[in-house]
Amino acid sequence: MTRLTSDIWVSAYLTRLRLEDIPVYVLSKGDPTAGAILVKVNHLDGTARVLHRSWDLQSGDRIWAELSTGDEPIVDASIAKQQAFDPDIWVIEIEARDGRHLLDDPSLA
């Protein structure tokens, strides 16, 4: 199976979000070919959640797993920690009071 490069995946994801009128911003551009991607969902109430690509160990499927959730400064600190470990990470922020991120769509796995 051919996987998309990170920059192409991010571009397609941004387009999908914008078509759904979900505000989205690229906070940090990572490696265009194989950079990891973090998606921060800002609930606009002082809380947030950050998701990352992972594997479901039981099924072997790629999934979006929660890395951190809670007060926004705590979530931002977890993102900064990941960036210190891997400077090639992409960080995308979505503003969605309802938490919509579209990552549950199988085409985005």
Image (cartoon, grey):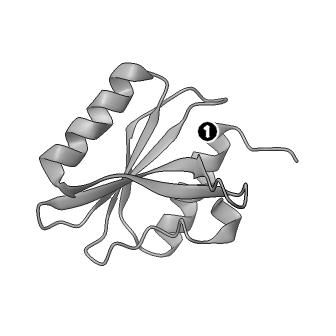
Q: Residues within 10 Å of mark 1 (few under 14, many from 20)?
A: some
| The furthest residue to the front | 58
Residue 47 % position (x, y):
17, 61
Q: Circle 1 sits on which residue?
A: 7
The quadrant in which residue 78 appears is: top left
Label 1 secondary element: helix
Number of marks in picture: 1
Residue at x-position 40% and y-position 73%: 100
Left of 4 or right of it: where is 46? left
**The furthest residue to the right:** 1
Q: Amino acid at mark 1?
A: Asp
Indicate the quadrant where residue 74 lies: top left
Residue in view at x 42 percent, y 74 percent: 21
Q: Residue at x 47, y 31 (%)?
A: 89
Residue drawn at x 47%, y 66% is 18
Residue closer to the observer: 55 or 11: 55
Residue 109: x %, y % from top left: 65, 59
Quadrant of the image occupied by residue 6: top right
106 up-or-down from 61: above or below: below
Q: Position of residue 45 (x, y in %)?
A: 12, 67
Residue 94: percent from the left, percent from the top?
35, 59
61 shown above or below 37: below
12 relative position to 79: left or right: right
